[in-house]
Image: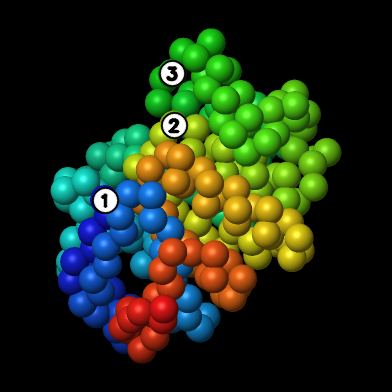
Amino acid sequence: MLQVRGLAKSFASGALFDAIDLEVASGERVAIVGESGSGKSTLLNIVAGLDRPDRGEVLLEGARLDFGDDDALARWRRANVGFVFQAFHLLPYLSVAENVALPLALLGVAGAERASRALASLDAVGLGAWASRRPGTLSGGEMQRVAIARALVHRPRLLLADEPTGNLDEANAGIVLRCLADEVRRAGAAALMVTHSRVAAASADRVLRLEHGRLEAER
């Protein structure tokens, strides 16, 4: 599903990583761990088309990302990528269902279908009854499950998660990680997560460590 080949990125201070290779299959969850500053978030941003590599390529289902065309990258992200962030990024003035429907609105999906798909996505994470509530009335774990529903509502082929349990206690983190695993399998998405959490990493199908510019299997 996802292929990364020979990816390299440098800054003025020196090379961050060089010749990174990575493959993630459909329905697979891969966690990347490493020290702060090792390049985990930069790698995630390049895979998302939010940053550009010095060299190398990223392919999704065999199609190569064109890093030279910002408009094309933006359209590609809307159609193919779902994001789950540590800080949830839910809009407080919208209902839970309206937050989940936002990716569909950006893709021009009609109102009735948006509402139906948003509710189905909330049902999948066990929050269908919360559709009309505002995010501020939810717990941290519930907000992160809403964020998962939003990330997958447009049926992306690639799910990217940046410290998805960083703001959660242990109990809520466990709920969110199980929900994330279930939904990735159901959607058949390729999931790539960067995390400092041993618990989050242990929930993945594979764990890779980014250290000294190299990406190597931890287990």
The correct choice, above or below, for 67 with respect to 219 in the image is above
Say if mark 2 contacts mark 1, CB within 8 Å. Answer: no
Binning the other alpha carbons within 10 Å of mark 1 as few (below 14), some (14 to 19) or many (20 upward) gives some
| Tag nearer the camera, 2 or 1 | 1
Q: CA distance from mark 3 to mark 1?
A: 25 Å
Give how far across and how far down residue 9 sits, in percent: 28, 74
Q: Amino acid at mark 1?
A: Met
Left or right relative to 41: residue 178 = right
Quadrant of residue 163 within the rendered picture: bottom right
| Closer to the camera in the image, 79 or 153 | 153
The residue lying toward the viewer, choosing from 49 and 159, is 159
Q: Amino acid at mark 3?
A: Val
Q: Quadrant of residue 50?
A: bottom left
**Is residue 153 found left or right of 198 in the rendered image?**
left
Q: Which residue is mark 1?
A: 1
- Residue 51: x percent and y percent? 34, 60
- Given this view, does label 3 or label 1 mark the residue nearer the observer? 1
Decide which of 114, 87 is in the foreground and name it: 114
Residue at the image point whose x is 43% and y is 18% from the top: 109
Quick check: marks 3 and 2 in contact, CB under 8 Å? yes
Which image quadrant is residue 6 in? Answer: bottom left
Which residue matches tag 2? 154
Q: Earlier in the sequence, mark 2 or mark 1?
A: 1
Q: What residue is shown with label 3?
A: 109
Secondary structure at badge 3 equals loop
Q: Position of residue 17 (x, y in %)?
A: 30, 80
Residue 33 badge: none
